[in-house]
Image (spheres, grey):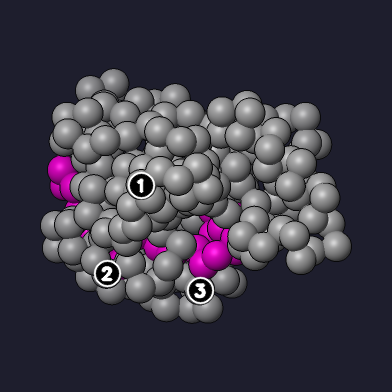
């Protein structure tokens, strides 16, 4: 449902600009930096984990809104953005590499996500796949190519527990975590993060478009194998790719109308 003139309870703002596109970092501290790449950026709202700015691309208003960490808050954010008229969301975040070719500083464009989180299970049974929208994914891949940023496109693992991944041996369920991690590696999962599958599933159900681009912080599997393990927290490439992808989507939508 679309509530243009009502303020959703959690995100805490009315979409007065009429934005239909939103870039979604997890970290509220990244919102202003991302918005600075838009034209005429300005602060909109701050409530709970949801800090929001708005700017313009190609004359089209674009929101930048943080979602906090994990599936529950990301799902609430997407639900309430839908309520105020947003139809396309692009998650931008960080991840840890899993596949050995994935290095710190590379980008990962998630085409789909392993649903190892709990939020999406309260939307649709686990057999339904968490898949990114093809138009948004193509815009991200083409933007990464054009800007010359190293990238990988494929499936990521989406989890609820950060420490369940990094310290599985101390968890009572460690036997399950370790066996599943090995399965994801053997199946070719590229990276691990915490929001993508919830964003994909909620967007799918609401009839929205969703995509995801991630900056690789490091790769623990490369370290385990005695390979060089670069660590980087520079989000510049991911921001540039997300901005350019939204620009492409805006232009494509105009060409279709």
Q: Residue at left 49%, top 35%?
A: 99
Question: In front of the other: label 3 or label 1?
Answer: 1
> Considering only vertical position in the picture, is 42 above or below 19?
below
Determine the residue located farthest toward the top in the rendered image.
256
Q: Picture quarter containing residue 170?
A: bottom right
Q: Between disc 3 and disc 1, whose residue precedes?
A: 3
Q: Residue at left 56%, top 33%?
A: 189
Q: Between disc 3 and disc 2, whose residue precedes?
A: 2
Q: Look at the numbered disc 1 and give the secondary structure of its residue.
A: loop
Q: Which mark is residue 194?
A: none
Tell me whether circle 3 and circle 2 mark residues in contact (CB < 8 Å): no
Q: Is residue 252 shown in magenta? A: no
Q: Is residue 7 left or right of residue 25?
A: right
Q: Is residue 198 left or right of residue 217?
A: right
* Image location (x, y in percent) of residue 86: 44, 48
Highlighted magenta segment, given as a residue range: 53-78
Q: Choose between 99 and 6: the one closer to the eye.
A: 99
Residue for badge 3: 49
Question: In front of the other: label 1 or label 2?
Answer: 1
Q: Between disc 1 and disc 2, whose residue precedes?
A: 2
Residue for badge 2: 32
* Image location (x, y in percent) of residue 238: 29, 48
Q: Residue at left 75%, top 49%?
A: 177
Residue for badge 1: 228
Determine the residue located farthest toward the right in the rendered image.
172
Q: Look at the numbered disc 3 and give the secondary structure of its residue.
A: loop
Q: Quadrant of the C terminus?
A: top left
């Amino acid at each position: 449902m679309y509530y243009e003139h009502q303020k959703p309870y959690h995100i805490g703002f009315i979409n007065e600009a009429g934005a239909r596109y939103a870039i979604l970092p997890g970290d509220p501290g990244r919102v202003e930096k991302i918005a600075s790449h838009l034209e005429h950026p300005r602060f909109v709202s701050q409530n709970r984990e949801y800090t929001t700015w708005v700017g313009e691309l190609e004359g089209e208003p674009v929101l930048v809104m943080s979602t906090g960490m994990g599936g529950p808050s990301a799902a609430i954010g997407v639900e309430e953005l839908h309520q105020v008229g947003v139809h396309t969301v692009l998650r931008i975040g960080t991840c840890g590499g899993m596949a050995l070719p994935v290095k710190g500083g590379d980008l990962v464009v998630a085409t789909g996500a392993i649903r190892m989180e709990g939020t999406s299970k309260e939307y649709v049974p686990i057999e339904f796949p968490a898949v990114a929208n093809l138009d948004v994914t193509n815009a991200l891949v083409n933007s990464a190519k054009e800007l010359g940023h190293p990238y990988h496109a494929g499936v990521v693992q989406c989890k609820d527990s950060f420490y369940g991944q990094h310290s599985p041996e101390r968890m009572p369920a460690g036997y399950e975590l370790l066996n599943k991690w090995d399965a994801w590696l053997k199946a070719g999962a590229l990276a691990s993060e915490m929001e993508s599958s919830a964003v994909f599933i909620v967007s799918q159900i609401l009839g929205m478009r969703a995509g995801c681009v991630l900056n690789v912080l490091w790769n623990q599997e490369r370290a385990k194998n005695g390979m060089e393990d670069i660590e980087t927290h520079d989000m510049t490439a991911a921001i540039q790719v997300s901005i350019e992808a939204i620009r492409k989507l805006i232009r494509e939508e105009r060409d279709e109308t």
